[in-house]
């Protein structure tokens, strides 16, 4: 893991995903393979404006970047042994795993929303909490 916040922000700007699914850091001089265990970013905070179908969910990443969930930046929930794991599409094949505390906020919004299936709205797009079968 890269611990220094300034380095995380710097490397996030040169991170790319290869066609084979691998991750690389690309500079003008070289291209370095890196290992990403789950997702390269973490959505650590969520800001909500509006309610129901007109809500907008904006996530702050561990890089400081802000990403609004919408048709181009989808939220998806992958099944895991320990329960669903939420991801937010950031850009060009790069995703952020949604931190557990933020996931709890999403789950509460879905429960309170009353949609069937349960899910959340953001920027006019609906994101069901469970993947479709």
Image: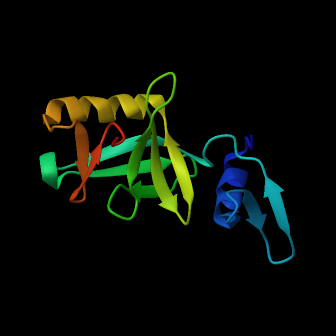
Dividing the picture into quadrants, the one containing residue 22 is bottom right
Q: Is residue 132 above or below residue 26?
A: above
Extreme-top residue of the structure: 82
Q: Is residue 24 visible?
A: yes
Q: Position of residue 74 (x, y in %)?
A: 38, 55
Q: How did the renderer colour the structure?
A: rainbow
Q: Is residue 51 visible?
A: no
* Position of residue 7 in the picture relative to residue 42 (left or right): right
- Tell which residue pokes out farthest to the bottom in this image: 28
- How many numbered discs sit on the rendered protein? 0
Q: Is residue 2 left or right of residue 126?
A: right
Up the image or down, 106 lies above or below 2; here it is: above
Instruction: Work out which quarter of the rendered image holds the N terminus and state it.
Output: top right
Q: Residue at x 67, y 64 (%)?
A: 16
Measuring from the top left, give residue 18's x and y in whole percent: 69, 64
129 w.r.t. 6: above or below? above
Residue 122 position, x and y percent, is 26, 53
x, y percent for residue 89: 47, 55
Q: Which residue is depicted at the point 67% across and 66% down?
A: 19
Q: Residue at x 65, y 58 (%)?
A: 12
Q: Identify which residue, 49 or 106, lies in the foreground.
A: 106
- Residue lying at the far front in this picture: please name it: 133
Name the residue: 47% across, 45% down. Answer: 87
Horizontal arrangement in the rendering, residue 126 relative to residue 115 (left or right): right
| Image-based side of 5 in relation to 97, left or right | right
The quarter of the picture where the C terminus appears is top left
In front: 33, or 66? 33
Looking at the image, the residue that sits furthest to the right is 29
């Amino acid at each position: 893991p890269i611990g220094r916040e300034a380095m995380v922000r710097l490397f996030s700007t040169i991170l790319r995903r290869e066609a084979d699914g691998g991750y690389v850091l690309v500079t003008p001089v070289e291209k370095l393979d890196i290992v990403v265990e789950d997702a390269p970013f973490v959505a650590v905070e969520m800001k909500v404006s509006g309610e129901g179908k007109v809500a907008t969910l904006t996530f702050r990443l561990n890089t400081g970047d802000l990403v609004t969930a919408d048709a181009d930046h989808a939220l998806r929930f992958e099944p895991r042994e320990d329960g669903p794991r939420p991801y937010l599409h950031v850009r060009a094949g790069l995703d952020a795993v949604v931190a557990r505390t933020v996931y709890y906020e999403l789950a509460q919004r879905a429960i309170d929303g009353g949609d069937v299936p349960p899910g959340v709205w953001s920027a006019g797009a609906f994101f069901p909490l469970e993947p479709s079968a």
